[in-house]
């Protein structure tokens, strides 16, 4: 593992701490997560999951994995240092100053978070595997020194292979759990979308939608003041739908006019998102062209089949005509009187 020098503590939990350190080789400031298992196999397993997931993820909006060390007693994970803290701090600052968070800031956070989550959910990014975060909340959304959002803490993450479509483990943080997870039903990437919606709602309202599920389902838009941006309101309501099938995917969100428009207008300050949007637009255009060509082939095949159908009907009509003629001839023959045998012999000459 890369040698480092500990500078100060950043945080502490029940099973370890996070410290600010400097890599001796490069002088880069990093965050070092030290976890002591204390005989708890579950903590060991969570550490293995986080290492496994972080090593597979490489995206501007996901905290960068640098190195790790794993032993039977503890784990050490070295990650990039996010100097500007977490999203919880931004929300708490707004609450303490009794002001709302600006619409532009909310859009900025929502789009960057969507891009990071899209990288986790999109199969092409990991050879067909999908990664569920399962613990999306403000504390796990960090900002580096430049203010770039970084999705962090994949300790509760879940890797779904192409053969797996759902999981049902009960994990996460109360207040950000989807209804299907909360009630022990199978769930997929849409559980992250619901948690994303909770975070977006909290940015808008400065409180988590902790009301019971029935209260939320009756219309979350009614909980928002009238001056909330219509686009934000619509997107938030869709993400917080009780029905997972009614929630958008990250691809759907990136294609939403309100988000796509924001990206187009902010590509200079957010070039990565602009590039991603361009790639997404090219992907959609390619799919549209493929669908158009397929539709043309189907139209051609339909025309060919229609021609065959017309020809078959014509042949059927001709056959019916011939059949009618044959039937008429048969009936005519059937009604003819049989010829008398006497008429077949020549009459004798009478003298």
Image: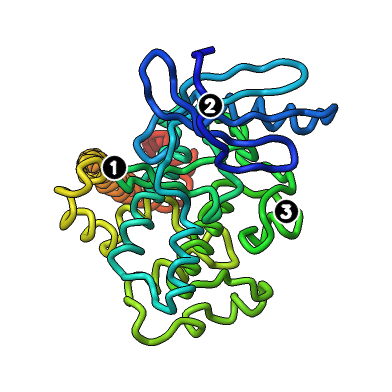
Are there few (<14), some (14-19), or many (20+) residues within 10 Å of tag 1? few
Q: Return the disc, 3 or 2, that comes first in the chain's sequence.
A: 2
Side of 330 where 260 appears, left or right: left
Are there few (<14), some (14-19), or many (20+) residues within 10 Å of tag 2? some
The residue identified by callout 3 is: 185
Q: Residue 139 carries which label?
A: none
Q: Return the disc, 1 or 3, that comes first in the chain's sequence.
A: 3
Q: Return the disc, 1 or 2, that comes first in the chain's sequence.
A: 2
Between disc 1 and disc 2, the foreground one is 2
- Percent position of residue 204, x then y: 43, 72
Q: Nearer the viewer, residue 78 or 199?
A: 78
Name the secondary structure under disc 2: strand
The residue identified by callout 1 is: 305
Q: Is residue 28 above or below residue 197?
A: above
Q: Which quadrant would residue 226 be assigned to in this image? A: bottom left
Point out the image quarter for the N terminus: top right
State the residue at coordinates (55%, 52%).
139
Q: Are marks 3 and 2 in contact (CB under 8 Å)?
A: no
Q: Tell me how far mark 1 sits from mark 3, CA to CA.
A: 46 Å
State the residue at coordinates (60%, 39%).
165
Q: Which residue lies furthest to the right in this view?
A: 39
Is residue 311 at least partly visible in the picture?
no
Q: In this view, does 107 lie above or below 309?
A: below
- Percent position of residue 193, x then y: 51, 55
Is residue 13 at least partly visible in the picture?
yes
Q: Residue furthest front?
A: 7
Name the secondary structure under disc 3: loop
Between disc 3 and disc 2, the foreground one is 2
């Amino acid at each position: 593992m890369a040698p480092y020098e500990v500078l100060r503590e950043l945080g502490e939990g029940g099973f370890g701490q996070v410290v600010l350190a400097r890599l001796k080789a490069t002088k880069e400031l990093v965050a070092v997560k030290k976890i002591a298992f204390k005989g708890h196999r579950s903590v060991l397993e969570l550490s293995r999951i986080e290492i496994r997931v972080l090593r597979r993820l490489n995206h501007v909006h996901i905290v960068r994995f640098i190195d790790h060390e794993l032993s039977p007693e503890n784990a050490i994970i070295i990650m990039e240092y996010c100097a500007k803290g977490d999203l919880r701090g931004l929300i708490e600052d707004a609450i303490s100053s009794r002001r709302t968070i600006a619409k532009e800031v909310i859009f900025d956070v929502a789009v960057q978070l969507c891009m990071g989550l899209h990288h986790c959910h999109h199969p092409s990014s990991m050879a067909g595997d999908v990664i569920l975060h399962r613990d999306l909340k403000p504390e796990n959304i960090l900002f580096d020194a430049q203010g770039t959002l970084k999705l962090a803490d994949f300790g509760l993450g879940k890797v779904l292979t192409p053969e797996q479509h759902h999981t049902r483990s009960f994990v996460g943080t109360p207040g950000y759990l989807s209804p299907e997870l909360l009630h022990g039903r199978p769930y997929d990437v849409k559980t992250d979308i619901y948690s994303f919606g909770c975070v977006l709602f909290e940015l808008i309202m400065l409180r988590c939608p902790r009301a019971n599920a029935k209260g939320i389902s009756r219309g979350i838009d009614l909980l928002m003041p009238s001056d909330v941006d219509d686009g934000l309101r619509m997107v938030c309501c869709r993400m917080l739908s009780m029905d997972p099938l009614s929630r958008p995917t990250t691809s759907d969100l990136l294609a939403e006019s309100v988000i796509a428009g924001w990206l187009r207008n902010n590509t200079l300050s957010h070039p990565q998102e602009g590039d991603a949007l361009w790639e997404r637009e090219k992907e959609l255009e390619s799919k549209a062209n493929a669908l158009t060509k397929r539709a043309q082939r189907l139209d051609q095949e339909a025309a060919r089949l229609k021609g065959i159908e017309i020809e078959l009907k014509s042949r059927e009509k001709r056959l019916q005509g011939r059949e009618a003629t044959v039937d008429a001839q048969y009936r005519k023959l059937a009604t003819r009187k049989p010829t008398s045998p006497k008429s077949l012999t020549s009459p004798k000459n009478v003298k």
